[in-house]
Image: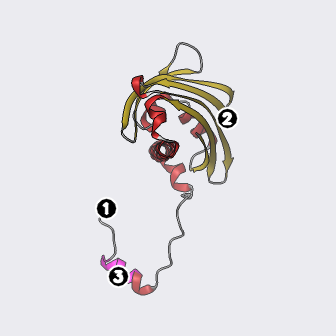
């Protein structure tokens, strides 16, 4: 499985770097993660997480090792995990942060291999689950950054936000009266 993408983050490059190297932040943001701790060696982490791909659910344990660390711009990581009879996963990833006017852009690539029952499910199901996990991670990461750095997140434009439509005087009047306001 190969996956790549970019995400605009509404925080500075340094703030994003700090968060991406904080085991507590990663534990909160990685779907199903219940353990993300410093390992025995420098730049190594012990990881535990529950994963569900189609009908197969498993608890994976493994490790993540960071290499080619260039603070606060980039690093590479290698990961491997065992899920018992469900199988295994291993692979490599690269992450880079580039500052820009809106904060910084995070770019990533992932190459992974799976084996065991998980591999028997088919590539489309595996790719769909991986994309869903990545989307969930970035949603959680964005929320964590907004909670940690509310001023920076509020100042940055939302990547998916469309410009607000201009309202005529009648629509503004109706809003002023309370019509059309969300109750959420």
Mark 1 or mark 2: name the one nearer the start of the chain. Answer: 2
175 falls in the magenta region: yes
Mark 3 to mark 1 CA distance (whole Å): 18 Å
Numbered label attached to residue 174? 3
Front tag of 1 and 2:
2
Numbered label attached to residue 59? none
Residue 71 horizontal/vertical position (percent): 67, 31
Mark 1 to mark 2 CA distance (whole Å): 39 Å
Mark 3 or mark 2: name the one nearer the start of the chain. Answer: 2
Residue span colored magenta: 172-179
Residue 43 horizontal/vertical position (percent): 59, 21
Mark 2: secondary structure = strand
28 falls in the magenta region: no
Position of the N terminus by quadrant: top right
Can residue 146 be seen in this snapshot?
A: no
Residue at 56% of width from left, 57% of height from top? 159
């Amino acid at each position: 499985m190969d996956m790549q993408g970019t995400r605009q983050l509404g925080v500075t490059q340094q703030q994003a770097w700090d968060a991406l190297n904080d085991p507590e932040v990663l534990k909160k943001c990685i779907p199903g993660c219940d353990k993300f701790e410093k390992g025995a060696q420098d730049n190594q982490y012990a990881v535990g997480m529950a994963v569900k791909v189609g009908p197969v659910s498993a608890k994976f344990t493994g490790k993540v090792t960071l290499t080619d660390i260039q603070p606060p711009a980039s690093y590479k990581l290698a990961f491997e995990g065992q899920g018992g009879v469900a199988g295994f996963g291993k692979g490599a990833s690269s992450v880079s942060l580039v500052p820009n006017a809106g904060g910084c852009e995070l770019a990533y690539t992932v190459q992974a291999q799976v084996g065991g029952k998980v591999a028997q499910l088919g590539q489309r199901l595996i790719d769909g689950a991986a994309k869903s996990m990545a989307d969930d991670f970035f949603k959680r990461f964005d929320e964590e950054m907004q909670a940690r750095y509310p001023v920076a997140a509020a100042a940055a434009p939302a990547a998916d936000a469309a410009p607000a439509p201009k309202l005529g005087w009648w629509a503004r009047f109706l809003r002023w009266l309370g019509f059309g306001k969300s109750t959420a």
